[in-house]
Image: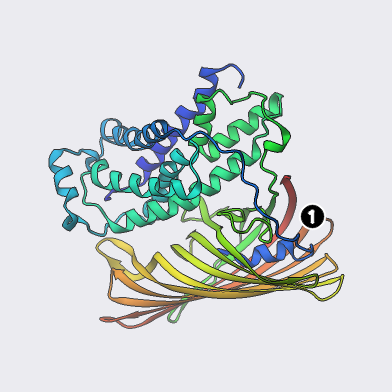
Amino acid sequence: MTKTSTCHNTRFFALLLLVMLAAPFYVSAQTATDAQKLITDTVAKAPPKPRSYLPPPPQQKRFGRAAFELLGAEVVPQLFDRFVLKEDFAKTSFKTFGHNLNPNSWTWDSDLFVTNQFAHPYHGSLYFSAFRTNGYSFWQSTPAAFAGSYLWETFGEKDPPSPNDFINTSFGGIVLGEMTYRFANKIINNRQRGFKRQVNEVVGLLINPMNGLNRIIDGKWGKVYGNPTDRDSTRLTAEFDLGIRKFGAKVGAVTNYGQFGWFGRARLMYGNRYKDYRVPFSNIYANVEFGNDDSSGVNSVNVYGSLAGWEIRSNKDLQHLAILSANYDYISNEAFFYGGQSVKMNIFSQYDVSSRVKFTTSVNGGPVLIAAIPNHGVFRGRAYDYTMGGSWGGGAGLNLMDKFTVGVDYRGAWLLTVNGNQSHYVLHAVTGEVRYQFTKALSVATEPGYLNLRSTYKDADDVTRIYPYLRLSARYSVDLYR
């Protein structure tokens, strides 16, 4: 998928969102990957014993509507790009269809980083959600992301299909789609009335447009119905940070120490890993960071979602748990950028040393399905190489008297270039956090860390980059929905 800018992606997503946002007022006048962070969030609380999962009442499966909405997510942006923005890549024909249907036509593209690593996964979440919001389960909805991605690559544009787009759109779409589906439904209380209910409906629609659209079609928007027990009882908590941060960079003998600038961050934690861990995405961690950066408004999006879990050993003082997770990472700041999608096996352990001292550890590892990582120079107009490989990591956390928390997290990866300059990369990242809690809701935190990237090239000198960083922030923690 070749484009000269990402503005058209923003425009067609904004147009699709605007149409959906206006619909309720027209239709009715009523309107991890940071796994260690999850450990420190629950370190002060004894985890509940696992219980059997009680699924919600079965929903009616509406295949026709789901297929129609998936095609709408294909056709609306395609027509907008072609006839409004007049993009060359959208000028498809039967000739381009025939060419793209040939398996030999597939080739890696050179789109901008934000297009491939963020816009495509978001678009894929619409395909997934078309079926997820029409009565299909998580696993039943996953083929929709792959089908939608293939249809777009083949018929949505005249450029040859690309494997990087197919993986990013499909896997990333599944992760973002299930996360937004659960968050959107969590914040809407069907027993609620008034202005707050309408605000929650709008917020839910913005989080997952397909879910909001189907609530409008079904007449659920703003309507009071159901029983209190029908609502998702999973706990949803949040942490909001506001502070200053500093990124540095060192390549060879050149060092740029950067300067402090403001940043904001929102972290959402859905569920408890020791509860209903066998159900896909019953435990979710999502992180979004932004600030006064010269690279992009959104600097980081990280999503961890559990796929399956197994209890290893548990008693009143000790918890061991294995969880298979799907992970999506998007990082783009003035010093460094990285986009990756992976599957990991995580081993979490919690030790209750005493009533006032809790200690946690984690180890993880698994394949990196695809990752975009900055190269040394440019490959065919692209400032990054596409890689695949493996990742590993671990961490530890200590909580004293529910007041003082210290933690450290390490992540490493070995990545082999599959499209780009002939090379391989070794990545090491260490992040620390020291936090003091004044009250249950208010705390201050400092987070030092650094990232080390070693690039080994076949036809050029090796390059080692070091990226130190520091964050200082005030934090507000809240239970959003119980």
Left or right for 337, reference 180: left
Give me the residue at 61% from left, 53% from top.
282
Residue 291: image location, x then y, percent: 57, 53
Could you tell me which secondary element the residue under label 1 belongs to? strand
Residue at figure coordinates x 32%, y 77% from the top left? 423
Q: Residue at x 34, y 66 (%)?
A: 386
Which one is nearer the viewer's eye here, 281 or 109? 281
Q: What is the number of callouts on the image?
A: 1
Q: Residue furthest top?
A: 29
Residue 465 visible to the viewer: yes
List the residue tagged with mark 1: 442
Image location (x, y in percent) of residue 270: 65, 52
Residue at image coords 80%, 73% = 317
In the rendered image of this protein, does residue 235 appear above or below residue 197? below
Q: Which residue ends up furthest to the left in the rendered image?
A: 95
In screen coordinates, is 364 left or right of 156? right
Residue 57, compared with residue 316, is above or below; it is above
Q: Quadrant of residue 87?
A: top left
